[in-house]
Image (spheres, helix red, strand yellow):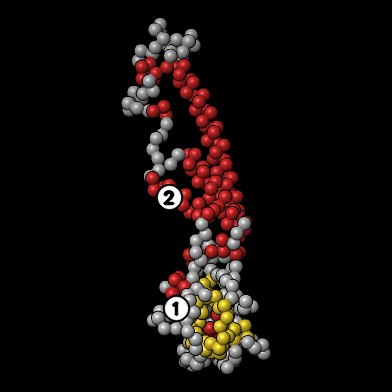
Amino acid sequence: MRRPVQTLLLALTGVGLLHAALFTDTYLRYVKAGLHPVLIASGVVLLLLGLASAVIGDGRQEEQGGDHGDEHDKAHGRDNEHGHDNEHGHDNEHGHDKAHGHDNEHGHDHGGHDHSGAPRIAWLLFLPALSLLFYAPPALGAYTAARSNARPVAVQKGFAPLPATSPLPLTLTDFTRRVQQDRSRAIKDRIVQLTGFVTPAEDGTGWYLTRIIFTCCAADSQTVKVRVYGTEAPPANTWLAVTGTWQPRGALGTKTAQAALDARDTRPIAQPVNAYTDDLPLTPS
């Protein structure tokens, strides 16, 4: 891969990052929102590196042009202080090789140029760069969630009293924590509202309300799921607001309790812009 192509790849990647971070919300499919400034800075650096590489490359070409002119003079016997190598205008010992651009020791020098290049597969590096500009990859969803383990819920020592709001909006993480750790069993018989997308159950019966959470980026994503009972499974990846009560399975307030909801109502909602968090329920559309 020659220098102009490398320069283009750097610049194209920088432009793609800036496009995704400044003019669209596509970057949220790769990293968490807090890394937005880092993405912008990375795009600027890559773009500047590409421009600098182009300028340096032009400068080297001009220098090489001057060097070729000197070599041309040497090849025609104008190298010594009198304008001649010897009385015949040639270097008897090496003139023939120098005039034809040959290296006496190894046979070939090709004018000092390195014709080695990167393997052709290196051209595939352009695909991710172009995708940032022209193709937004699909968001992580039910396919990923069905093949990943549920995120372990951190231990919480104490719980504040639940507000009297009904239905009570909770995140999937908070609901799971209340079900499995709150020994006061305050969640019992409370009508709650949770939001997420649909993931079909592994056994083909039933479904989960799901959230995928980015700790840093898509590579370290984790899944939190709540099993939903009492209604047929909607299409996978459908975003829903689900209202219901805890489905009594296991001992409430202990780890034997299943994070499960007995659904009373399900309503479709729009996918949030930042879908890779476990935020409080959105207002149903």
- Figure label count: 2
Q: Position of residue 247 (x, y in %)?
A: 51, 90
Q: Answer few, some or many: residues within 10 Å of disc 2's Cα (few below 14, many 20 plus, some between 14 and 19).
A: few
Name the residue that disc number 1 marks: 200
| Type of the residue with mark 2 | Leu
Is residue 8 in sight in this rendering? yes
Residue located 50% across and 92% down the image:
248
Quadrant (top left, top right, bottom left, bottom right) of the N terminus = top left
Residue located 56% across and 54% down the image:
17
Quadrant (top left, top right, bottom left, bottom right) of the C terminus = bottom right
Most foreground residue, 129 or 237:
237
Q: Between disc 1 and disc 2, whose residue precedes? A: 2
Q: Answer few, some or many: residues within 10 Å of disc 1's Cα (few below 14, many 20 plus, some between 14 and 19).
A: many
Name the residue that disc number 2 marks: 124
Most foreground residue, 210 or 133:
133
**Element under label 1?**
strand
Residue 60 shows which numbered tag? none
Residue located 47% across and 91% down the image:
249
Q: Is residue 127 above or below residue 61?
A: below
Q: Position of residue 139 (x, y in %)?
A: 51, 66
Q: Position of residue 230 (x, y in %)?
A: 49, 88
